Each structure stands twice: as structure tokens, then as C-alpha cells.
């Protein structure tokens, strides 16, 4: 058996849509779950590991929307990819590092620094990530609808 695995989830929100979470392998809408295949579970189903990463992704989006609203900051949309490094330690497996990779689409390039600040604030206040012992690493990507010089 391997000593480390990586799991993935993604969430997004756009002004014209509702927020949603999805898994990379297209799990069904009803929540059937299993242990991960690498631990003897059934392939293609949600796992507790995916539930945790989906909670991180959806909480981060909710936190970003809250800080953006409080700051009266308008943005076009946000998508958050979350990867969790699940490693074996001396006392068993656990998530050791969770990579939050939000991509935000803003309306204009001058809003880039403010967007970065709000992303960092959302990462700090998200109650789900604050409740975890795993190290949280924020890797942001900001896209401007109207970049400077275009």
C-alpha cells in the first residue's frame, strides 16, 4: 500500500448560477459513498476524503462571497480547486496539506491587489479550514475580464 494519496474536489459560483461542488470523476448527484478504492472501496463514488475537501471548497467560496459582500466588491465568478495530500504517519493516515487553488474572474485589472487581499482574508476566516490540523496552502489565480493593455 502507498504511503501518500492525493484527493481532489472543486466548487464554483458565478453571478448567474448557484454554487455547486463536483468531483473530478463525475460522481452521481445522489450521495452514495464508499471508502476510496485504494483502501478497498468502490470506484466512482464519493468518499469521506472527498466530503472533507468539498466542505473546504464550498466553505472557502462562502467565505469569499461574505468578505466580498462586506467590502462591496463585485466579481464575475470564482472557482476553487482543492487538493488534499493524505499521508501515512506513525499513528495512521491523515490530511497533512490542503492546497486551495481559487481562480477569480474580476471585471478590471486594477482590482487585482484588492482581490488578492480578499482571497487571503477568506482563507483566514473559513471555519472549515480553521478547524483542520492540515497545513492550508493558498495558491491564487486572478483573471481580469478587461486586462490592462488589451
Image (cartoon, rainbow, N blue to C red):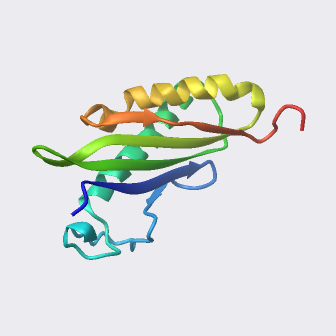
Tag count in the figure?
0
- Residue 44 is situated, as x and y percent measured from the top left of the image, at 35, 74
Residue 147 quadrant: top right
Q: Residue at x 44, y 70 (%)?
A: 25
Between 121 and 16, the one nearer to me in the picture: 121
State the image coordinates of residue 10 (x, y, percent, origin top left): 47, 54
Report which quarter residue 125 is drawn in: top left
Can you say which quadrant of the picture contains the N terminus?
bottom left
Image height of 8 relative to 62, above or below:
below
Residue at the spot 42% in from the left edge and 34% down from the top edge: 137
In the visual, does 90 lie left or right of 56? left
Name the residue: 62% across, 48% down.
15
Residue name at image x 31 percent, y 66 percent: 46
Front-most of residues 25 and 66: 25
- The residue lying furthest to the right in this view is 149
Residue 146 x, y percent position in the rendering = 82, 38
Quarter that holds the C terminus? top right
- 119 sits left or right of 126 in the view: right
The quarter of the picture where residue 28 lies is: bottom left
Q: Residue lying farthest left?
A: 91
Amino acid at each position: 500500500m502507498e504511503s501518500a494519496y492525493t484527493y481532489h474536489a472543486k466548487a464554483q459560483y458565478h453571478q448567474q448560477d448557484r454554487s455547486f461542488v463536483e468531483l473530478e470523476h463525475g460522481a452521481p448527484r445522489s450521495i452514495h459513498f464508499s471508502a476510496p478504492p485504494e483502501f478497498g472501496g468502490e470506484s466512482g463514488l464519493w468518499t469521506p476524503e472527498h466530503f472533507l475537501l468539498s466542505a473546504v471548497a464550498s466553505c472557502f467560496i462562502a467565505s469569499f462571497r461574505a468578505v466580498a459582500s462586506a467590502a462591496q466588491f463585485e466579481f464575475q465568478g470564482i472557482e476553487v480547486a482543492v487538493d488534499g495530500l493524505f499521508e501515512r504517519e506513525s499513528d495512521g493516515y491523515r490530511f497533512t496539506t490542503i492546497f486551495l487553488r481559487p481562480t477569480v474572474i474580476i471585471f478590471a485589472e486594477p482590482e487585482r491587489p484588492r482581490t488578492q487581499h480578499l482571497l487571503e482574508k477568506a482563507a483566514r476566516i473559513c471555519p472549515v479550514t480553521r478547524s483542520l490540523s492540515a497545513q492550508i496552502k493558498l495558491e491564487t489565480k486572478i483573471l481580469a475580464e478587461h486586462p490592462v493593455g488589451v
